[in-house]
Image: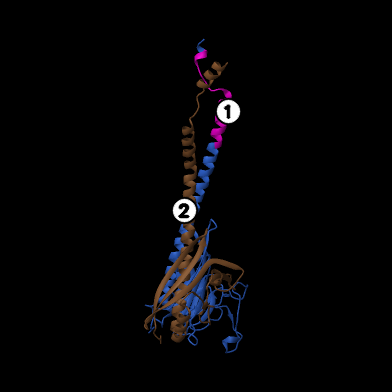
Chain colours: A blue, B brown
Amino acid sequence: MSNKKFKAFSLIEIIVSLAIFSVIITVVIGISVKMIDAQNKLQAKVFLVQTAQITLELMSGQMRFGYNYTGTEPTKTNANGTIYLSSNKIEGKNCWDDKGTSDPVDDTYQDPNASGVCSFGVLITKTIYSQNLSDIANSPIIVFESHEGNPNDLSDQKVFCAYNNKLYYLKKFLPDTSTPGAFTSRCDEGQSILPDEVKLEYISFDVYGDSSTNPKNPMVRIKFKLSNGDGATMELQTTITQRLVSYF
Amino acid sequence: MKKITKKIIKNIKAFTILETLITILAISLMIVGPVAFVAKSFHYSDFINHKIIATGLSQEALELATSLRNLDLDEFQKMASKCSKSCLIDWGGNGSTPTYSKCESDSECQLFLLPNSDGSRSYRHIYSSEASDFYRYIEITKNGSQSYTVEANTYSYNNGIKLEVKLKKIIFAIVVK
């Protein structure tokens, strides 16, 4: 008698309701997960973009008011990150094989990765004490004097260099005790410009500053590519002309 | 029989059309709103991405024009008279001076990603295997006899929308010694 007063859902109604509820919940959770993932990717991408902008500004700003730009051939990979600066070639340390003649043109450059040839495995950049600029395409490194620097001192040369997919700004060199007149530093002793989350895919400089062909118009083209762990990449390029009217 | 049917119909309780529509609308907003927000954010991020690359390329065009002035004022003035309307400007790298020529359509002003020997790539006005998303030209206006206004315009298309970065620079007609 009392059972007749209770109204309840039938089994079919409950099953259908549960099925609909499950579908809706699954869709909503799926969308939420995708959205969180997308949001994280978006944040990483925005971070990459901001990093690229700051990096470009920093490098352009420093180089624009610098002078005496020097690069090196792209084959001279920075194998172990050590950089030597000297007004002359340093036998062994710059991986040059001296053929014994007085003419350095006879010497051949050795692959720093080859065993037994160049134990230092270094990149050497020959920088000079006076206005002696160079033309280099696709240099992996750039060495220059800052506008407040002393052109007769190699220890205060500024360098942008890459090592282990990181970009460094090197500001100071110390005398190489084993080689008179040479200065040395490790690339990764410089200030790291990129955050850990951002990887430098490549950096390359075109240096146009040869005093014989381009005495009053040194230019540097900067090309680099950044990426993050989520597959976002950015390839940037700009060119700067020197702003200094006179050097000395 | 008719009476019974009417009674049954009267006893059935269902949602009204208004309730149903409001429910569908609310669920749709719950799902579509956040998705649209994220999609818009991605679009905006792409926009900023393109803008920064385009800024670098426009800056480069201005620097190349300045460099031509520094190298040879006469050559720069010739360029100015030729480039009152869109001209491309390009630089081949070390050992060469910047070059310019008329470009009047997207295909003529497009930048390509030229592969280099070291694995890097350069944005150049030279056809290569991969076209970049960017187009660039400069326009030069003479301001009396003393100076020129150089406008560099780099643009790209993002989902059919044209994104432009225009930079201007006044270049004085002086001989750089």
Q: Label 2 is placed on what type of residue?
A: Ser
Provide the chain ID for the residue under circle 1: A
Image position, residue A71 (x, y; %):
51, 77
Element under label 2? helix
Image position, residue B91 (x, y; %):
52, 77
Most foreground residue, A76 or B66: B66
Outermost residue to the top: A1
Q: Is residue A231 above or below residue A142?
A: above
Q: Which residues make up the magenta segment?
A: A3-23
Element under label 1? helix
**Which label sits on residue B41?**
2
* Residue occupying image coordinates x 44% and y 61%: A50
Image position, residue B154 (x, y; %):
48, 68
**Which label sits on residue A15?**
1
Res A151 quadrant in image: bottom left
Provide the chain ID for the residue under circle 2: B
Q: Is residue B111 above or below residue B76?
A: above
